[in-house]
Amino acid sequence: MREVNVGDQLDQYRLTELIARSGMASIFKAVDDLNGATVAIKIPYSQFESDVVFYSRFQREEEVVRRLDHPNVIKVYTPRRKSRMYIAMEYVEGVSLRALMRDKRPLPIDEALGYARQICAALVYLHSNQVVHRDLKPENVLVTEGGRLKIMDFGIALDETARRLTWSGLSSTIGTPDYMAPEQVSGKRGDARTDIYALGTMLYEMLTAELPYAAENVYNMMRAKTSEDPQRPTHYRPDLDPRLEEIVLHAIERIPRNRYDGAAEMLHDLDRPGEVVITDRAERLHPRSLAGQKIRRALWTVAFFGSLVGILAFLIWLANRYPASPQTSQRSYRGQIK
């Protein structure tokens, strides 16, 4: 099946503008010829349409979002007929939260809290409907000119009402490394607390313009998430209210049972930060600095190559201390050719 382009007619939709391209799909602005409404059409590239795993995820995304109805969740429409794989969604005039975070580093506290509250309210709704997003990140959140947030991209969402879906048929570790919870890094499917971790990480970044773990590459970051403590937000923003730091650190606890029990509990704290009780959560952290990681890696490298040199020197000493007997070697050679 050929790729579609601006100007093409796709069933009842006329594609008018290319909005974005990702690694697996294109999103077009389109007009619904049946009612004149402006919509967004997400169309996978043709090479992925025959991929069973991709098809399952794409189909699940449409099925999950179609049954949801919340002001902070993107809406999905049902076309009269479908001639190929695509998702028809509401068109949102706005920018990604990532774009806003690039323009303002860090975001003003009130603005960051306002966005976090909206995302958290959406999570309360999603989790009450047994849906776990599992890929929350600034790129998957649209912000309208009026400041309304819309969560999108439910491609790897967990729908706990869909009995036919089995985890083993998909990927073991999925998500976006910067916002993945430690249990996702370890290959577990995650639950509602996985979304809480991602929101906590997003709030951390909105407030500090940094991520909780300093790492040179994605592999070090994923390892750190499963075994190390994050850096305190006040390390980057000393003027940050300790009660906001408490909220963030509570959300990104490494062990799921130590996080908020649910999104409603976190939303309560976001709505009433002045009532948050400060614990010793921040004082118990012992994060490893990026400089410390480099020093430890350098020491490990020196120790490794030092060991190799030592082993080589020992073998040379053995060879000199116990040289092979020429007669023995000759007898051995003659024995082999008899």
Image (cartoon, rainbow, N blue to C red):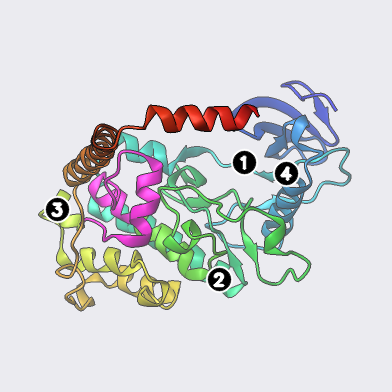
- Whichever of labels 3 and 4 marks the residue nearer the N terminus, that label is 4
Q: Disc 2 and disc 1: Cα gap in Å?
A: 24 Å
How far is disc 4 from disc 2 in space, using C-alphas? 24 Å
Q: Is residue 227 magenta?
A: yes
The answer to whether the residue labelled 4 contacts the one labelled 2, judged by CB atoms less than 8 Å apart, is no
In the picture, measured across the screen, residue 313 lies left or right of residue 191, that is: left
Q: Which residue is mark 1?
A: 91
Q: Earlier in the sequence, mark 2 or mark 3?
A: 2
Distance from the alpha carbon under mark 1 to that under mark 4: 9 Å
Amino acid of disc 1: Tyr
Q: How far across and down, in percent of the image, does residue 2 sit?
A: 82, 24
Label 2 – label 3 distance at C-alpha: 32 Å
Label whose residue precedes the other's in the sequence (4 or 2): 4
- Residue 65 relative to residue 56: left or right: left
The amino acid at mark 3 is: His
- Please provide the residue range marked out in magenta: 203-231
Question: Which of labels 3 and 4 is toward the front?
Answer: 3
Q: Specify which label sits upstream in the sequence, 2 or 1.
A: 1
Dot 1 or dot 3: first in sequence order is: 1
Question: In this rendering, which labeled residue sits more in front, label 2 or label 1?
Answer: 2
The residue carrying mark 4 is 88
Residue annotated with mark 2: 127
User: Callout 2: 10 Å neighbours few (<14), some, many (20+)?
Assistant: many
Question: Please, what is the three-letter code of the amino acid marked with disc 4?
Answer: Ala
Residue at x 55% of width, y 71% of height: 127
- Looking at the rendered image, the disc whose residue lies closer to the viewer, 2 or 3, is 3
Residue 73 lies in quadrant = bottom right
- Per the image, label 3 sits on a secondary structure element best described as helix
Query: Residue 259 in the image: x percent, y percent?
Result: 37, 73
Residue on which disc 3 sits = 235
Residue type for callout 2:
His
Residue 219 drawn in magenta: yes
